[in-house]
Image (tube, rainbow, N blue to C red):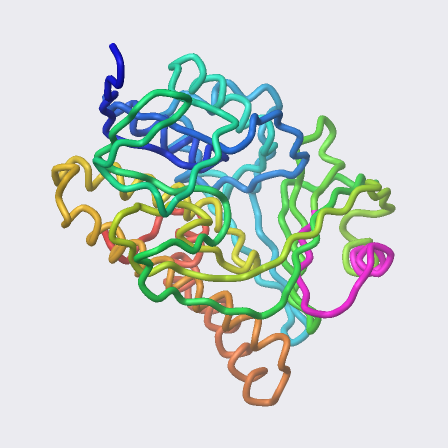
């Protein structure tokens, strides 16, 4: 039929990790969903992803976790060190793993297979966001569509019309990501070292003999791969032994931000907010965006303005806490005045000596703690 309008509940713009999972979660709710992306994905991303306990359960509910061919690498212990305090702060949980490390490309491949099987993913579609509106007829691949809600998940900060003020911290940092093999067993431990040049995280990577790890080094100083390798060897030789680094180093700009509200669209993942990787929770917060959206759909009609406003207000609370905390921690360590150092010592000792605070910190890291619920 000429000019037939295909009516859908949701359009998902961006089919990366969070966008694809959003589409699958909405489809599971029996909603009519279409996901589009500007490129045809051939997963080549060699990076890994730290999945906390809450996100793991979410992937299990979507039927994805059981399809991972590479065995996830458990994180049983997180060891935090800095240049101010001794001894190290050690976080662990007696009942379950603190998290798991999986391969980005493998997760995306499984999600896309499911979307393609459901016939709800269209690739190689570039669309002007400012031309989109809920219920407005939109032409995609020579067909006409109408959507009740539009979700934006394109993996970066987006500027579109009708966007109210967003919080942005332009600190000029870069995040460097790479891998290395090592002599000693990593014993399922993740490390976070806070230095004046920025935080350095070393995580166990999926590998058959527990002798491969990934690193994330964030800094606003000029650096090079040889310098980064030298820092890692110096700080982790005692725990990891001799090291052999991969040739490839990934570099990403860090622009922490948080979108307060948008009248037409629902933003999820890095389109809604990005935080400094010092917390290691950016992707896991994206999962919580999806979970909050699903929860509100059970409570409000799709056309309701309350769904839009409550979604943003709730995600604003948790995301603001992370954004503020990570920016503050970075500032304190990179500016070592007596006042800043004393504040760090106080917070550090509180976590060491007060079980209640340490338990909350652990639950937060696992995605088990929320100020909203």
Give the percent coordinates (x, y) of residue 371: 28, 58
Give the percent coordinates (x, y) of residue 53: 43, 39
Find residue 344 and report its image quarter. Answer: bottom right
Q: Residue at 28% x, 44% y: name it.
A: 292
Q: Residue at 52% x, 57% y: name it.
A: 279
Is residue 97 part of the magenta span, yes or no? no
Q: Residue at 62% x, 57% y: name it.
A: 253
Horizontally, residue 144 falls left or right of residue 253, namely: left
Give the percent coordinates (x, y) of residue 22: 37, 33
Relative to the observer, which residue lies in front, 10 or 234? 10
Find residue 49 and report its image quarter. Answer: top right
Q: Give above or below for 321 relative to 104.
A: below
- For the N terminus, the image quarter is top left
Relative to the observer, which residue lies in front, 288 or 234? 288
Q: Give above or below for 237 relative to 120.
A: below
Give the percent coordinates (x, y) of residue 155: 50, 45
Seen from this angle, which residue lies furthest bottom?
338
Seen from this angle, which residue lies furthest front?
2
Q: Residue at 71% x, 42% y: name it.
A: 213
Horizontally, residue 205 falls left or right of residue 72, namely: right
Q: Give above or below for 189 relative to 9.
A: below
Residue range (magenta)? 215-232
Relative to the observer, which residue lies in front, 134 or 249? 134
Is residue 225 part of the magenta span, yes or no? yes
Marker count (numbered) = 0
Q: Give above or below for 68 relative to 200.
A: above
């Amino acid at each position: 039929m000429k000019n037939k309008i295909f009516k859908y509940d949701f359009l998902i713009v961006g089919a990366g990790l969070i966008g694809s999972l959003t589409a699958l979660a909405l489809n599971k709710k029996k909603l009519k969903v279409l996901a589009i992306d500007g490129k045809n994905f051939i997963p080549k991303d060699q990076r890994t992803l730290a999945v906390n306990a809450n996100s793991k359960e979410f992937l299990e509910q979507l039927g994805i976790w059981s399809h991972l061919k590479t065995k996830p690498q458990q994180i049983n212990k997180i060891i935090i060190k800095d240049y101010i305090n001794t001894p190290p702060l050690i976080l662990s949980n007696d009942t379950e793993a603190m998290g798991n490390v999986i391969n980005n490309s493998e997760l995306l491949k499984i999600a896309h297979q499911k979307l393609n099987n459901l016939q709800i993913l269209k690739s190689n579609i570039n669309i002007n966001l400012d031309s989109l509106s809920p219920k407005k007829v939109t032409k995609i691949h020579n067909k006409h569509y109408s959507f009740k809600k539009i979700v934006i998940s394109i993996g970066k900060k987006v500027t579109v019309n009708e966007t109210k003020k967003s919080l942005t911290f332009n600190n000029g940092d870069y995040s460097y990501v790479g891998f290395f093999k090592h002599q000693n067993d990593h014993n399922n431990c993740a490390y976070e070292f806070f230095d004046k040049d920025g935080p350095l995280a070393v995580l166990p990577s999926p590998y058959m003999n527990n002798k491969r790890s990934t690193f994330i080094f964030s800094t606003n100083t000029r650096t090079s791969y040889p310098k980064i390798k030298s820092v890692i060897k110096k700080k982790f030789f005692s725990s990891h032994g001799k090291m052999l680094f991969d040739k490839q180093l990934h570099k990403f700009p860090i622009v922490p931000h948080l979108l307060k509200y948008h009248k037409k669209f629902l933003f999820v993942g890095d389109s809604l907010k990005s935080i400094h990787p010092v917390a290691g929770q950016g992707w896991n917060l994206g999962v919580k965006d999806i979970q909050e959206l699903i929860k509100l759909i059970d409570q409000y009609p799709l056309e309701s303005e309350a769904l839009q406003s409550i979604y943003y207000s709730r995600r604003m609370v948790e995301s603001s806490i992370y954004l503020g905390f990570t920016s503050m921690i970075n500032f304190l360590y990179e500016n070592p005045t007596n006042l800043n150092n004393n504040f760090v010592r106080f917070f550090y000792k509180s976590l060491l000596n007060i079980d209640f605070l340490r338990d909350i910190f652990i639950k937060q890291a696992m995605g088990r703690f929320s100020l909203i619920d």
